[in-house]
Amino acid sequence: MTPLVSIRNLHFRYPDGAVALAGVDFELHAGETVALLGANGSGKTTFLLHLNGLLQGEGHVEVTGLPVRPDTLASIRQQVGFVFQDSDDQLFMPTVFEDVLFGPLNLGLPPEEAELRARAALDAVGMPGHDEKAPYHLSAGEKKRVAIAGILAMEPALLVLDEPTTYLDPPGQAALVDLLRDLPQAKIVATHDIDFALALASRAVFFQAGRIAASGPVAEMIERFDWDRRPRALH
Ligand SMILES: Nc1ncnc2c1ncn2[C@@H]1O[C@H](COP(=O)(O)OP(=O)(O)O)[C@@H](O)[C@H]1O
Ligand SMILES: [Mg+2]
């Protein structure tokens, strides 16, 4: 089966000279959920931004069987739903419904079909009854749901989420796990949240200095890189 994502020897350097990716190989198949672990600055976000061509480094990047190139970008962006770390970077329309409607309308769908998709997406994330609210009046958890609904309305094959639990309280984090688990799409999730990774991902890749240092079961990666160093209670 053709992998959903196939990346070979990816290198990327920011204009200021910072080397962010130094030879990444990665593959993802339909139905998989992979957690990206690794220290701040290890290259996770830079890597994710290559999946829909927001950044284009040197190496081979293929998504849904298509090489990421100017002529394939539109198709790839429909297939790859990118959920930004900060929902405020994603939500920009005056109301929730208009925000979710924007993607399918932008795909050129007839308005009635776009509205059906937006309705279904808001139901899927558990946000009915908020259509007329302004996104900036929502809680962090609700904003994340609406951002995900906007992505789902495009019917992507792959969901890419960058630190999705950053602004969520513990119940919000648990609710996000439940929501994402129920979605059939393959997922790539960069996260510092160990419980979230353990609950959601079937495998993890561990980034170090712009490379994937190892990959395997989430618990094994956490153990190997001593990644669970939460403060212990005092006695
Ligand atoms: N816009 C940018 N300009 C210059 N350097 C950047 C930029 N964004 C990230 N970097 C650098 O690239 C490296 C990887 O960063 P990033 O992909 O954000 O890592 P992570 O998401 O794992 O924290 C770091 O050294 C970071 O400082
Ligand atoms: Mg990051």
Image: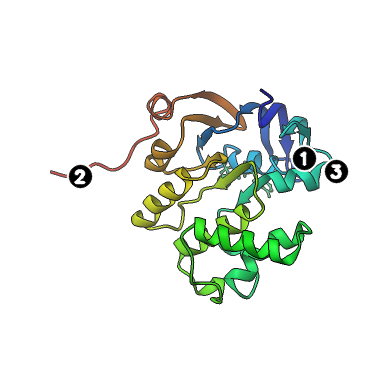
Dots 3, 2 in contact, CB < 8 A: no
Mark 1 sits near ligand 1, with its Cβ under 8 Å away: no
Dots 2, 1 in contact, CB < 8 A: no
Name the residue located 56 percent from the left edge and 55 percent from the top edge.
148
Where is 60 relative to 193, above or below? above
Distance from disc 3 to disc 2, alpha carbons, whole Å, reads 53 Å
Left or right: residue 22 compared with residue 169: right
Displayed quadrant of residue 73 = top right
Distance from disc 2 to disc 1, alpha carbons, whole Å, reads 45 Å
Crowd band around label 3 with a 10 angstrom C-alpha radius: few (<14), some (14–19), many (20+) = few
Pick the front one: 234 or 81: 81
Name the residue located 70 percent from the left edge and 66 percent from the top edge.
112
Q: Nearer the viewer, mark 1 or mark 3?
A: 3
**Residue on which disc 3 sits:** 70
Pick the front one: 219 or 107: 107
Crowd band around label 1 with a 10 angstrom C-alpha radius: few (<14), some (14–19), many (20+) = many
Q: Which amino acid type is shown beneath numbered disc 3?
A: Pro
